[in-house]
Image: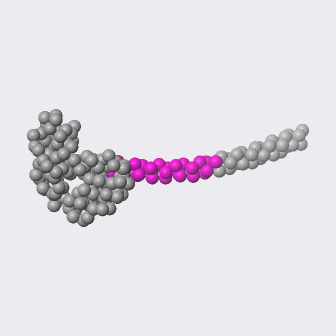
Amino acid sequence: MKRVIIGIAALALSGCQSLQQTLQEKGMIEVTCIETVLELNDQPCQQLAWLDFWQQQQGLAWRERKSLIEQLGDGPADRLKMAMLSFASDTPYQARLRAQHNLAEIAEQLTPGLANLTENLLVQPNQQLLEFESALVTLNKINTRNAQQNAQQAVKIEQLQRRITDMQKQIDALLKIETNLTAEEDVNEQ
């Protein structure tokens, strides 16, 4: 709910093409922007331009976004674009982790409005997803190790069962010999 409110607030402070039209139709904003070049500033049109860029990229498959990322430079605006292109849920773990580190490196260069926008829109959800995936990997490793240990223990139990069976046969054989010897002594005494 907090993210939705923050997103709506960010949108209300901003303006650009597709999101702008939707928000204007709903009466949520009154800002009008012309085509806006993505730059790192806190102008209302810039913030909505970044949101519009992010929204448009979310529908693309990872392969398409990856090819777009490969065309970007190393400047702060391009690195922010790379982060936005990398934070979809179908992006591989390593690519999202790399994007998060890149975004952290340029965080000081972002304006307060863009820093707030990226923190709420990109960093927090991505960090949570990374933590969940790390936890799953760790649990899978633990489960694999436990399964291997269980298999080894099952083999040991089977070996011990065979040994117990062999020892029981030896005990039965010794008891039979003892019974025969006792029976012979009883016969000899009479």
Q: Residue at coordinates 80% horizontally, 43% vertically from top-left? A: 176
- Residue 24 in the image: state x and y as whole percent: 14, 38
- Give percent across and percent down for residue 71: 30, 62
Q: Nearest the camera: 186 or 139?
A: 139
- Give me the residue at 33% from left, 54% from top: 65
Image position, residue 23 (x, y; %): 17, 38
Residue 73 appears anywhere in the view = yes
Residue that appears at 14% across and 49% down: 34
Magenta stretch: give its range.
130-158
Q: Main secondary structure of the magenta part?
A: helix
For the C terminus, the quadrant is: top right
Q: Assess whether residue 144 is covered by the magenta stretch.
A: yes
Please indicate, yes or no, whether residue 47 appears anywhere in the rendered image: no
Residue 20 among magenta residues? no
- Quadrant of the snapshot with the N terminus: top left
Residue furthest toward the bottom?
A: 74
Residue toward you, 59 or 177: 59
